[in-house]
Image: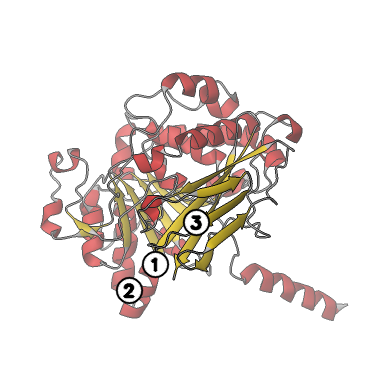
Amino acid sequence: MHLWKSFLLFSILLFTTLPVKSDRVRTIVTTDIGGSDPDDQQSLIHLLTMLDCIDLEGFIYQHAWVSFNKGNEVTVTEKALDAYEQVLPNLLVHSDRYPDIQTLRKLVMHGQKEAAMSGVGEGKDSPGSEWIIQVVDKDDPRPIWIAAWSGMNTLAQALWKVQHTRSAEEVEKFISKIRVYDILGQDDAGAWMVTQFPELIYIRNKAVYGWAPDDEWTREHIQSVGPLGKEYPDRKWATEGDSPSFLYLADNGLNTPEHLNWGGWGGRFDLERKEGIRSMDWVPRSGLDETKYDPYLMTGSTPEGADAIRMWQQEIFNDFEARMRWSVTSEYGSANHHPRAVIGKDKSTKAIYKKTKAGKLVEIDASRSSDPDNDQLSYQWLHYQEAGNYKGKLTFIETGSKLKLRIPTDADGCTIHLILRVTDDGTPALTSYRRIILDIE
């Protein structure tokens, strides 16, 4: 009996220390929620509805910015989490991957006490900066994405400490696990980080507006829907300016965050880093000078800018609307759910690679796709021209779920990205995707 108990205890310990296996992307949010612009609060509500397809591992107040809110950041966040707690039993009916409320509450903490790079250095560790280090150090092979809805000096402090306490090899390993999606640039910490750590993957997206729904749609489909809707504030300037940072990460069959130039719900980005992607104009007006770090290099949006998000906007809206309906619907059969897009026998959400030759006929079969609600499915095949390097016209021979494509004779050496949209006829209509990448020999 003692041997059995010892074996059981060992098995439990072994299981709990194994690296996490998940298809979801890990993210930490830094935020100035509670300020004069309520867009962070809007983005938080949207994010909470998507926590079954994104692993949230931290929600960090940029204290120097939110201190002007006199504690409003805490009140706003607690109200949002209280609303999530109320609707969680309903959400779990529709997806069992939503995290429990106790886990979420433990992820909320403050970052630096001082603004920008003045808050970085010896003796300036914060609960947020220490937590970032702990999360990055986890025995988890997945990278951690920092979604910057605010200034970035909490991450800068974490990197400063690692830089000053670890070997060069250890620092390199630490940096290799971090990805940054910076919305607009809101202090000088980003410029410092990419100067100090040029290998850091750092997106600064300046094209985050123009994709969001209008006020009328928001009132009808979000704000009027249950406890979460009550916590979704009216727009003051732009709606959900920060949301592309996590829309980019959602596990939906389209998004491929590690491939910056492939495009998805959060935009598409250049592989070649650029100089002079400056922060918002109020940053220099506040006395901060990024130019002292010149020349610093960051990853910026591709020429299509916010159009790279707008091409999926109706599907983003429908997804959000459906999730809000989940939050107030206690029966699975009374709501709509995403179809499953299947290529051949592959039921995953991963991109599929196929090697072929110019002039050859390629056949792709998505007929095993299905819908959990037994809705009728429609199929749309898209040549995502910007994501590949073949710029010619493709001629599709389609029969619903099956595609035939004759590879053009001038496509030698090219890469072609095909996107399959599988959409149901439920309310709202929901879409799942698959990406097929053709390497033409």
Counting from the top left corner in percent of width and height, residue 164 is at: 28, 72
Residue pictured at 50% horizontal, 41% vertical: 47
User: Disc 2 marks which amino acid?
Assistant: Thr
Foreground label between 2 and 1? 1
Of residues 295 and 71, the one nearer the viewer is: 295
Disc marking residue 432 = none
Of residues 75 and 344, the one nearer the viewer is: 344
Q: Is residue 298 visible?
A: yes
Tell which circle, 2 or 1, labels the residue nearer the N-terminal end. 2
Tell which circle, 2 or 3, labels the residue nearer the N-terminal end. 3
User: Circle 2 — which element?
Assistant: helix
Give the mark count: 3
In this view, 207 is above or below 385: above
Residue corresponding to mark 2: 165
User: Circle 3 — which element?
Assistant: strand
Q: Residues within 10 Å of mark 3 (few under 14, many from 20)?
A: many
Tell which circle, 1 or 3, labels the residue nearer the N-terminal end. 3
Q: CA distance from mark 2 to mark 1?
A: 50 Å
Residue corresponding to mark 1: 412
